[in-house]
Image (cartoon, rainbow, N blue to C red):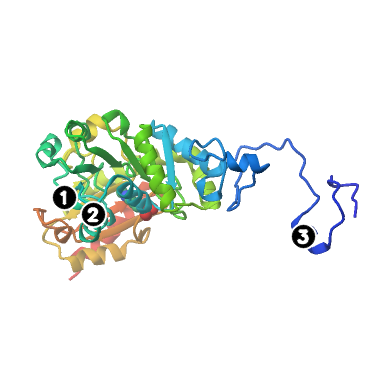
Amino acid sequence: MRSAFFSLRAMTKKSLQTALIHSSYEAPPGFDAFPTAIHHASTVLFKDVAALRSGEWKEKNAYTYGLHGTPTTFTLEARLAEIEGGEFCLLAPSGLAAIAMIDFALLKTGDDVLLPDNVYNPNRELGRWLQQDYGITARYYDPLIGAGIAALIQPNTKLVWTEAPGSVSMEVPDLAAICKAAHDKGALVALDNTWSAGLALRGFDLGVDIIMQALTKYQSGGSDVLMGAVITRDRGVHERVATAHMRLGMGVSADDTYLVLRGLPTMKMRFEAHDSGARKVAAWLKARPEIGRVLHPAFEDCPGHENWKRDFTGAGGLFSVLFDARYTEEQTDRFVDALTLFGIGYSWGGANSLAVPYRIQAMRKEWKDGGVLVRFNIGLEDPDDLIADIERALATLRAA
Ligand SMILES: *Cc1c(COP(=O)(O)O)cnc(C)c1O
């Protein structure tokens, strides 16, 4: 059937069933819009056999298979590399998958990996698993060790993980000193840079080799996507990570990739709004008698504050407090339950504020402070409303 309205390609006559698959319609060329197009693909088509035979996906200038990249995923990778000041980027289906991909790329049986004692807990558990089942030793260091890490680096230490700051207890490491010590002894340094979204900390400039981001947080900004990224500057390191990415079949969905791309233009403004809201709430909490300590990198009593001051240009929405040791966990749980504007749940970077109590003394053997730790993610609500909500909930501490 011919139509005068739609432009149809002339094709040989085919049955309705085949026509449902091989349509004659071709959309007119020349369409343009700001959003990146969402390309869904498992199969990627080659124009002929010669093109199929010459397919080279590694340089990201050709397409071979959906898993190896589409214009949608290449665009997000390039934009994330740009933000961090890197050269290469690979996407993973979660932040944790990105962490695992780095370990699989850079560690083999007999190697040693160092992790900060305040590292994101699933990364700590991954280290324990590598040690238990894969013949890799995983050792944990004081996040404030600085140049002293040199004494821990052995000839088989291939990777030093850093996280700036640790996303529960908030110690800020001296990244430049750790990188120097690691490089002097031939180890690579990976940074979990999720807290600063790559906006407030220039990891590569401090000597970091590999930057990992949980795009689940600020990049998405919607509390609706799980995705991770690994960004590098050195081609050799990138190629090792790319091999792990390929061998492990790390794919991400086109729709999720689009959601992250959609979040990027507003990310810096959202980050700054989270930052100013969080500092206002943290300052208010600091003056409260119920609170023992505020663990916010921009505050002087946060361990490693001097490193934050030297290296960072902002802070975002995540910080923790230690309640005064006179309050029991039962009381502070009641406080968290009494909050109405804060969800109880993990993650951060979305518009909604969150609160999570942590058993920090059980997580960290050398932890000296008493008092229950509660981590706040300050969302994009009016901070005065959040303060009023916290003030109401604090009143429950006084109830018998
Ligand atoms: C959330 C988070 C991750 C993991 O990201 P997922 O996408 O949830 O797997 C890793 N590191 C830090 C610091 C995080 O906050």
At label 2, the amino acid type is Gly
The CA distance from mark 3 to mark 1 is 59 Å
Percent across and percent down for residue 253 are 52, 53
Does any portion of residue 371 appear in the rendered image? yes
Image check: 15 left or right of 340? right
Q: Residue 140 carries which label?
A: 1
Percent across and percent down for residue 15 are 84, 62
At label 1, the amino acid type is Tyr
Percent across and percent down for residue 177 are 18, 32
N-terminal-most mark, 3 or 1: 3
For the point 17% across and 31% down, which residue is it?
184
In the displayed structure, 115 sits above or below 237; it is: below
Mark 3 Cα-neighbour bin, 10 Å: few <14, some 14–19, many ≥20:
few
At label 3, the amino acid type is Leu
In the rendered image, the quadrant that contains the C terminus is bottom left
N-terminal-most mark, 3 or 2: 3
- Secondary structure beneath label 2: helix
Q: Which mark is residue 127?
A: 2
Percent across and percent down for residue 235 are 38, 33
Q: Nearer the viewer, residue 31 or 268?
A: 31
Of the two numbered discs 3 and 1 in the rendering, the one whose residue sits closer to the viewer: 3
The number of callouts visible is: 3
Mark 2 Cα-neighbour bin, 10 Å: few <14, some 14–19, many ≥20:
many
Residue farthest to the bottom, as pictured: 400
For the point 55% across and 49% down, which residue is it?
66
The quadrant in which residue 212 appears is top left
Image check: 389 left or right of 135? right
Q: Residue 20 carries which label?
A: 3
N-terminal-most mark, 2 or 1: 2
